[in-house]
Image: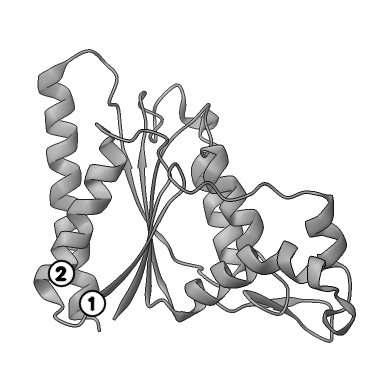
Amino acid sequence: MRVMQVDASPKRTHSSSKMLSAHFIQQLRQRITDIEIDYIDTSLNPPPHIDHAFIEALYTPAADRSLVMKQALSYSDNLCARALMADMLVCAMPMHNFSMPSGFKALIDHLVRSSLTYTVNADGTSTGNLSRQKVLFITTRGADLGPGSPWEKMDALRPALSSAFSFMGADDPVFVDVQPLDNHDVVSEKEVLDQAYQTLNAIAQRWVTGI
């Protein structure tokens, strides 16, 4: 069992999203003996942002790519291969200005690749190639943007993640949106986190049972 774990918080310590993803991985380890974790921390090793060299290489036929072009695509090629090999994708991040941290957006830009994570069909439609993988998104938010909240329509994070990964074939990702975590109430924050840990425990059990 291979799990790609991605932490996208820029915090090195005291990150709620990193603590939650670590807890979920621990729950999997307790239930799966042959688990292998492929870990990515976008704060320690930031994905390169897409530049001119990447675009030029991307739109050059593979047989015609120079060594420099191949190097420009090497991070993306490797990332796509790792995602395709994984059985589970566990991605944790804080909400930044209603959407994802820039490091995770850069990761997505490298991950959405024609002929790798999706295939263009003869009729012009596309088929995602990550349909086999279970996908979990753990998101932490300072405010409550859940259903019924006055901030509900400001949540651009969940739709963006759903759209990108659905395009790559992950049509039914699981979301654990942990909110609010910035209401200056220590007791309330602990209750929110405790509920998130319980939810993650249940997801781990459900995923393992379904293997």
Neighbour class for label 2 at 10 Å: few (<14), some, many (≥20)? some
Q: Is residue 165 above or below residue 192?
A: below
Q: How is the image coloured?
A: one colour
Location of residue 2 by image quarter: bottom left
Question: Disc 2 residue type?
Answer: Arg
30 or 149: which is nearer to us? 30
The residue singled out by tag 2 in the image is: 29
Which percent across, then down, holds residue 127?
Answer: 66, 78
Which percent across, then down, holds residue 138?
Answer: 34, 48
83 or 131: which is nearer to us? 83
Location of residue 195 by image quarter: top left
In the rendered structure, are the residues bearing label 1 and label 2 in contact, judged by CB atoms less than 8 Å apart?
yes
Q: Is residue 186 left or right of residue 100?
A: left
Location of residue 179 by image quarter: top left
Question: Disc 1 residue type?
Answer: Ile
Which percent across, then down, holds residue 96?
Answer: 49, 30
**Real-space CA distance between mark 1 and mark 2, rounded to the nearest whole angstrom:** 7 Å
- Residue sitting at x 18%, y 53%: 23
The residue singled out by tag 1 in the image is: 35
Q: Is residue 72 left or right of residue 84?
A: right
User: Which element is circle 1 on?
Assistant: loop
**Furthest residue to the front?**
67
158 or 69: which is nearer to us? 69
Question: In which quadrant is the N terminus drawn?
Answer: bottom left
Earlier along the polypeptide chain: callout 1 or callout 2? Answer: 2
Q: Is residue 189 above or below residue 61?
A: above
Question: In which quadrant is the C terminus drawn?
Answer: bottom left
Q: Is residue 26 above or below residue 17?
A: below
Which percent across, then down, holds residue 109?
Answer: 66, 55
**Furthest residue to the top?**
184
- Residue sitting at x 22%, y 12%: 184
